Image (cartoon, rainbow, N blue to C red):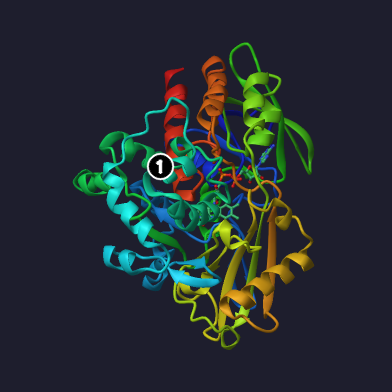
Amino acid sequence: MNGTERLDAIVAGAGISGLTTAWELHRAGYRVRVLEAGSRPGGAIGTTREAGALVEAGPNSMLETSPLIARLVGEVGLGGERVEANAAAKKRFILRGGRLVPVPTSPGAFFSTPLFSAGTKLALLREPFVARYAGDAEETVASFVRRRLGPEFLDYAINPFVAGVYAGDPERLSVKAAFPRLADLEANYGSLIRGAILGARERKRNPEKSKQTAAMMSFREGMQSLTDAIARRLPAVDTGSRVVAYRRETDGTFVVSVEGGGGAAEVRSRALVLSMPADPTASLIAPHSQDAADALRAIPYPPVASVVIVFDRARVAHPLDGFGFLVPEKEKRRILGTIFSSTLFANRAPEDRVVLTTFVGGTRQPEMALQDDAALVATVKDELAQLVGAKGDPMAVRVSRWARAIPQYNLGHLDRVARVERLSETQTGLFFCANWRGGISVGDCIKSAYGSAERVARYLGAR
Ligand SMILES: Cc1cc2nc3c(=O)[nH]c(=O)nc-3n(C[C@H](O)[C@H](O)[C@H](O)COP(=O)(O)OP(=O)(O)OC[C@H]3O[C@@H](n4cnc5c(N)ncnc54)[C@H](O)[C@@H]3O)c2cc1C
């Protein structure tokens, strides 16, 4: 690192958000340096191998919701490595009464499924006639779903789905912030079903895909291939380099203080992009805006543990013929859900082995994620024995734990984000791009990063 080097932009944080922003700026000809506190780039994305099986600590897959994703993948030379989910993974299960019940995927299957009672099936038929929300207060996901589809749909469809995506609680998440598409369907069409039907033609013309229709993808060697490939092609990604403060000189230059293996250093740049979780971002901006820092610190991040277990296939009774299963809170279990990782993509494990990735904790049971490894693995093994008939000793186990896993877009989230963004208006040249704004999925992070890179380039070009 060279203190006199004059950069166009520093990106703090080498998760998918920071790396994509840096890549797009580099591609546009700007001098960029990425500073990452951890020992490797990738952030939440991390792939390893255990007992010959590919193991994902964080995301197992991403949804190709935008042409920007194929563009990024192609530009970093990963086009040939891309893999799509097996057709079998279209089937998903929800736990009801201790049994894995397939989620219905057609109207016929919906009306015959044992997952919902006749009352809920009728509620779906009534949904187009339910009035739009007339209240002034921001609505939770739970209130939205109860109002439009009834309590059982909340308990046995949305509650487990929200556990799977946010490890969160529908009674606290804001429908507008966490699922903006649902809120838009109601606002624009007066109904989710009417919106799904009437909006079909419009969506066909739009190159962006909804999460329901987008292809589910990864790479032959797992998700980390993407962050590794971007980092390899960038001119400067400094790992073990924690950004601890920044100040501005009178000409607007950012002077960023970095601590790392080699001691402390200062790096200068014309723009600064903070692509880090809310807490460390709050520490950096507190001297510049206490209000923005307070807003960031108010974003909850529940803990989550992922436990990946490789089993001998012969020891698992369930055919594992799907994406995996999710657990409604009402079922009172000790796990949030399990991905059948070796069914999801081909060649994830030798033929005679299966890989199960189980998530524990979240807003529902934060204490469960914080158990020690032995207790955590014992819990997961016990649950898997009961739910998919996985018996005997695993061939390999990998535990990953996030004390602060996923930002919750709870009530008030959009106001909090607006309070943070206000600092970018007064401190021009400062940008935020991370999963606490614009969506938490890998695909949303990539889309947001392209937007951020465009704003940074506009700022750099204008000066
Ligand atoms: C267990 C789990 C499972 C998930 N599953 C899926 C899934 O299946 N599909 C999907 O689409 N999404 C999934 N997600 C969500 C998605 O993976 C994340 O939202 C996304 O990867 C976050 O990327 P990011 O770059 O915004 O943040 P991060 O990946 O958190 O990166 C932020 C980086 O900033 C660094 N940093 C922090 N402080 C500093 C500092 N002071 N100086 C420098 N660097 C710093 C961190 O070390 C980190 O590398 C999952 C997330 C988790 C945790």
Going by the image, does 232 lie left or right of 210?
Answer: right
| Residue at 61%, 65% in the rendered image | 358
Image height of 252 relative to 58, above or below: above
- Which residue reaches farthest top? 250
**Quadrant assignment, res 104:** bottom left
Give the quarter of the image for residue 444.
top left
In the rendered image, which quarter contains the N terminus? Answer: top right
Tell me if 405 is positioned left or right of 123 in this view: right
Residue at the extreme bottom: 314
Closer to the camera in the image, 170 or 148: 148
Report the amino acid beneath label 1.
Arg
Q: Is mark 1 within 8 Å of ligand 1?
A: no
Residue name at image x 63 percent, y 51 percent: 364
Q: Residue 17 appears at what percent x and percent y?
A: 52, 42
Q: Residue furthest front?
A: 119
Of residue 183 and residue 232, the one placed in the foreground of this image is 183
How dense is the environment of label 1, judged by Cα within 10 Å: few (below 14), some, or many (20 and up)? some
| Closer to us: 16 or 108 | 108
Please name the residue that numbered disc 1 is placed on.
Answer: 147
Q: In the rendered image, is residue 449 in sight?
A: no
Q: Is residue 148 above or below residue 414?
A: below
Along the line of sight, which residue is nearer the eye, 146 or 106?
Answer: 146
Provide residue 158's location: percent of width, then percent of height: 47, 52
Q: How many marks?
A: 1
Image coordinates of residue 416 in percent, x first then y, are 56, 27
Horizontal side, residue 315 vs residue 211: left or right: right
Relative to 167, residue 99 above or below: below
Residue at point 70%, 82% (across, down): 393
Which structural element holds mark 1?
helix
